Amino acid sequence: MGARLRPLLPHRRLKLEALSGRSFLMDASTELYQFLALIRTPTGEPLRDGRGNITSHLLGLLSRASRLARDYSMGLIYVFDGPPNPLKARALDKRRRAREEALSEWRRLLGAGEQAKAWSKAVASAALNEQIVSDAKKLLSLMGLPVLQAPEEAEAQAAYLAAKGVAWAVGTKDFDALLYGAPRQVRYLTLTGAEWLPSRGVALRLQPELFELQEALGKLRISREQLVDVALLMGTDYNAGLWGIGPRRALELIRRYGSLEGLPQALLKELGEEAFRARQAYLRPKVAELEIPEPRPPEERELVDFLCGQRGFSRPRVMEAIARLREAWAARRAWGPA
């Protein structure tokens, strides 16, 4: 889920037109989870082909990426996660158990005929597997979009490359990108997307939000290292944090004491050594000097074979997306400078 920093950070809500011509390093897993959660049948089942392979994410990627490329001249580079940092084991286990509980409740509600309630539980049960990730990489590559494999966290790799000027911003929902040092982050780079809020049982319509690291640090009057410490006090994917500490209280503590090391001993003891290991995961993440693949025209025959021949897509839908990609490539609009 990432750090709970939104209440502290200045941001601007934008229309997609304001981002036209920009390039983005996309956190692929965030995209995939959104499509898997929301592109479902009325009973909550993900879309599948005739062999049982899940295709919700392929439909989402095909539509969104081709339209952002053509209609908004965006350059999209997708970054995929590598093996997770061992510090994330607890957070990942918690998410796994939550998905399993949601899946069990979905089946129970569906059996009881409560379809509307069941659908909300199905959304919360979305999970990635090797086939889903492999199919996503194959699709994006056939579309001509650059695909990168991070050695560990995709957001860390994307932030590192964005700081080097490879792209204008990182596209991701989670604020960890800013903690990793991304100069800019755009949340909800979507056309007509929604985010499901389980606690409220509603889907919130999404609009792009721009966060700029230096602007945020200036407003908060802290350094990036201190921003990381603020997040660690609340708890992150890497550490549990302090019980009952929210964003404003965490900021107050870091402003008052300067850093984790300056905290009163009682708080330091409760925080534990885990927080200092987590700090290093943010400030010195595992990243690589990756070669950025050149964008290419779509591989039209291979796209039709994969999506129509192997994954059961309708040919008209695929040809429409190919036409959008062809237009974007011909105009070279989607592949502009960062």
Image (tube, rainbow, N blue to C red):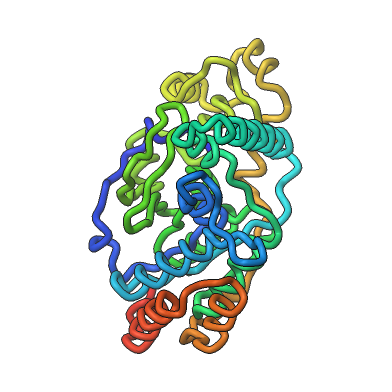
Residue 144 point in image, percent of width and height? 50, 80
Q: Which residue is drawn at 48% across and 63% down?
A: 25
Foreground of the two, 71 or 187: 71
Name of the residue lying farthest toward the top: 266
Q: In the image, 237: left or right of 246?
A: right
Q: In which quarter of the image is residue 138?
A: bottom right
Q: In the image, 315: left or right of 238?
A: left
Q: Residue at x 40, y 47 (%)?
A: 213
Q: Kindly tell me whether residue 201 is visible in this rendering.
A: yes
Q: Quadrant of residue 263?
A: top right
Q: Is residue 55 above or below residue 44?
A: below
Count numbered badges in the picture. Answer: 0
Q: In the image, 54: left or right of 220?
A: right
Q: Kindly tell me whether residue 1 is visible in this rendering.
A: no
Foreground of the two, 301 or 291: 301
Residue 325 point in image, percent of width and height? 40, 80
Q: Residue at x 44, y 67 (%)?
A: 167
Foreground of the two, 53 or 270: 53
Residue 233 point in image, percent of width and height? 56, 25
Q: Residue at x 51, y 29 (%)?
A: 230
Q: In which quarter of the image is the N terminus?
A: top right
Q: In which quarter of the image is the C terminus?
A: bottom left
Q: Is residue 196 above or below residue 40?
A: above
Residue 199 point in image, percent of width and height? 45, 27
Q: Is residue 10 above or below residue 146?
A: above
